[in-house]
Image (cartoon, rainbow, N blue to C red):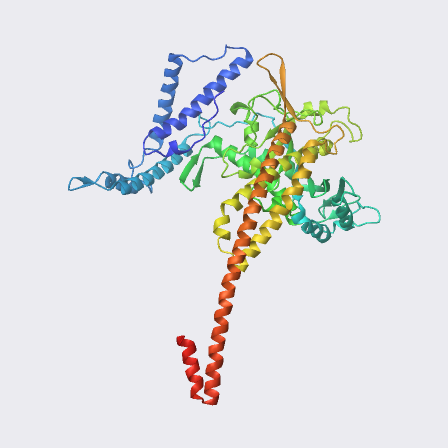
Amino acid sequence: MTKPRTPGAAESLPEGGAETKNYAVCSRDDAAQEGETASEEGDAPPPTTSARDLRSEEDAIRRIVREGREIVPDPGQRWTRWYDIPYLILSGVSRLRVRGKRVPWRIRRQLQIWSRHIWTYNNFDRIKAHPADDRTKPLLVPEGEEFAHGGIWVTEFFPPSMYSQLQESVRRNGWESDYYGFGESTKGEQIRRARQGRGFAWARIATVTSPEANFVGVGLRQPIPVEFSLIDVSVRQIGRSLTAVVAFVRLSDVGRTQVDSVWKQEHEPKLVRYQTGPSVEGRYFAALISTQSERERMHDLARKWLSENCAGYFAASDLGQPVVDYGLFSKFDPISEVSRQGNGDPLRMLGLESVSFGHYLSPQVPGVAFEPGHPLRVSLSERLRNSWGLVGNLSKVREANRDQVGYGEHPFSVDTLAGMSDDAVRAFLLRVAAFRYVRSLGEVLGESRDSARSKHLKFSPKSMEALRGEMLLNSLDIPVVARDVQSLVDGSDWWPEGIVVSAEIDDPEGGVKTINLIDNMGKEVSHQLELLQAEDAAYRDVLASAASLGASASQGRQSRYALALAGLSLIVALATLAVATGDPALWEVLRDTILGG
């Protein structure tokens, strides 16, 4: 099926073709959708493209555009809208000739930009004026379809340079007093021992609920977002240098249905302003962006809570902490069905997009597909790229987990099914976070390298202090963290059978080929670590040499400054003595000293 084109620059051209392209997309989508439906029901063979079909489609497009212009005429054809007169003025000035010469091209270009913006506003008025039940309303959620959020996992890393922040967070948040104790030692002491290789590999350190929660038993009572019901916080020691903190957020009734409620709302067209100017988002794209933004907001609530309570390396990055969430559909099955416009485009509305060859699946989390974040507008939902979604069909996931015991009565709820997957999802999230962490280290090192000349060209005491801090942060972390991250991607984590996430595709040479996501991540992390360590060593050598030369030059300058200051002090002393004694000989000496005689 042809995917809807993302509206953009084509809709802002100062010609009528903008609307033609916009409605052409809707018409093609509907035609493809109707063909798919007929094919699925067996009423007709799959649609074929012919010259007659294309002519019919073009006629339909022309009719839609003509009807749209009858409802909302082009700019300059009325006097009642705010942009009609400005558009006529811009058009007249751009065609103006003075003594046979046109307006300079730089001015004409700016006038054309403003004219395109006016056409965008005109296109926005036209899309709004169309009735919602015609071809411009593309997103229809099937009756009875529901999406339920089961839980959100978010993680934070603490390398050697941030170890003190971890200890301070445990102490400040009162996690030492939580039920999950460590025998006679405090949690901070046990974390210290774990980083020395003498303590735990994994442990839960806190459970947080709201003061109004109905949970009975252990847990800290603290204010949390209304979308959350309970937060489990655990630590995972990776080697001796890296500690990971993972928070599993169980959602309340409000949070569980938040994305679903936004998905089913009636979304009107929106006028979005980018740096390059305004752009029109039709009903379909407005629905997608709003739903994706709501899912991103849920992620950011979890990120914000972890940042406020236990901020580490990822908290200061642009994309924030890596996130994995779990959600199930009541009807749609992401594994066996195609996400398309006719069924509400479930995966795209979440900001997920299946890889071209199929779905990643895991035997440790049966019935769900692992989908990477893929926002429609990176500028609006950039952090969705730093997330993965575990999605499936509620009935099929229940069937796949029917033999699980100890989780209450059947049928299992969405949050219960998410809780069953807790250990495996934590293992997967750590691999994703390690991959993101190594890439982030490379980005930071690249930025430091590119700005080294401007920051360290002159070695003042202030710049020397900044250099010392930079080397303590990056170069202290990279060598030991590289060793321990490598052990994570090579090992099987704490999950007994390891975490396996793979996809099967048809091999062109025959048979089935398996693509192992975890192995591929591990290979990429290993490759990036090798490059990172080599670049870091070279960068540190250059900075150390530059710092040594800069220190020598700075010492020479300071010696000259000291010599000049001593000479000045001698002159002042001679002048003071000459004034005090009134001896003419001293004035002669002072004159010879100043003039060099």
**Relative to 506, is 483 above or below?**
below
Name the image quarter holding residue 15.
top left
Q: Is residue 342 left or right of residue 106?
A: right
Residue 590 as seen in the image, left or right of residue 389? left
Residue situated in front as seen by the camera: 150 or 194? 194
Q: Is residue 299 visible?
A: yes
Q: Position of residue 181 (x, y in %)?
A: 81, 46
Position of 424 with respect to 523 (left or right) is right
User: Up-down: is 534 above or below 590?
Assistant: above
Q: Is residue 155 visible?
A: no
Q: Quadrant of residue 488?
A: top right
Give the position of the C terminus as an image quadrant.
bottom left
In the picture as drawn, the residue positioned furthest to the left comes out as 99
Q: How many discs mark residues in the rendered view? A: 0
Residue at 60% from the left image edge and 46% from the top image edge? 474
Where residue 59 appears, x then y in whole percent? 36, 19
Furthest residue toward right: 184
Please identify the residue farthest to the front as the structure is shown. 597
Q: Nearer the viewer, residue 151 or 436?
A: 436
| Image coordinates for residue 538, horizontal then vertical, percent | 56, 43
Q: Residue at x 46, y 22 (%)?
A: 29
x then y, percent, for residue 9? 39, 33
